[in-house]
Each structure stands twice: as C-alpha cells, then as structure tokens.
Image: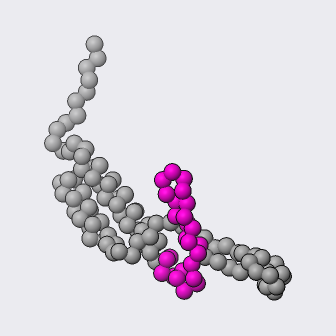
Amino acid sequence: MRRKRLIAARERSLARLPITGELLRGSLLERTIRNHARNCAKCASGEGHRLSVLTVSYPGGRTRQLSLRSEMVPLVRRWLANYQRLKAAIEGICEINQDLLRPDESGSTPRRKRRD
C-alpha cells in the first residue's frame, strides 16, 4: 500500500514538471553604474544608471555576466523561475525514489538482536 502511494505521488510530481525549453540557470542582479561617460548629468549627480545583469557560475570558479536590456528582464525572470521549479520538482522525485528503495515495513516484522 505504501509503495502504491509513493508511486502515485511520483507520477503526480512528474505530471507537474515544467517541461519547457525556457530554462535558465543563474542569478539576476541589479546594479547601478556611474561614470560611464563624460558629461553625463545623472552620473555627475551621483544618481547613476540602473542595470540588470545575469550572473552564471561555472565549474572551476568561472563566472559569466551578461548585461540585459530592460525589456529582457521579465523573460529572464520567468526562465529563472522555471529552472527553480524544475530543480525543486526533481529533488522531490529523488526523495520519493529514495523512499521506494527502503524495504516495505508491512511485509515483515522487525527482529531484535539477541544479547548474549
């Protein structure tokens, strides 16, 4: 019975997977740049310019940063959210599969070790 419930839970999780090509790993950062050009009134006042940056880390400590246009930010946020949902769903399925590998308690009674 327990095994059937776990398999049903796994199937429900699989059905909810956000299977899409719209996935993106990384972090979205907001930065303010100043002094990008001479005679810029915003930079001279200290206000600066807001800039969105996608940061992605790679093995070996390498990091790639991509500056984004403001119209790309909602798309990048959606792709990052899809990635996080997929990652969480995969972790949940892995937990269920670990439970499926455990012996079924209903089939046998636990035995106690005898003390000498």
Q: Quadrant of residue 4?
A: bottom left
Looking at the image, residue 32 sits to the left or right of residue 27; the answer is: right
Question: Residue 106: percent from the left, percent from the top?
Answer: 18, 44
Q: Residue furthest front?
A: 38
Please name the residue shown 36% across and 64% down the image: 89
Please name the residue shown 49% across and 77% down the image: 76
Please name the residue shown 40% across and 62% down the image: 88
The reply to whether residue 48 is visible in this rendering is no
Please name the residue shown 54% across and 80% down the image: 73
From the viewer's side, name the closer residue of 81 and 96.
81
The reply to whether residue 102 is visible in this rendering is yes
Question: Residue 63: percent from the left, percent from the top?
Answer: 55, 60
Q: Which residues are magenta?
A: 53-77
Looking at the rendered image, the quarter that the C terminus falls into is top left
Q: Is residue 107 above or below residue 89?
A: above
Q: Is residue 61 above or below residue 115?
A: below
Q: Residue furthest top?
A: 116
Question: Residue 115: percent from the left, percent from the top?
Answer: 29, 17
Question: Residue 39: percent from the left, percent from the top?
Answer: 82, 85
Q: Quadrant of residue 71?
A: bottom right
Q: Is residue 15 above or below residue 111?
A: below
- Confirm whether the magenta stretch covers residue 61: yes
From the viewer's side, name the closer residue of 98 and 25.
25
Q: Is residue 45 above or below residue 57?
A: below
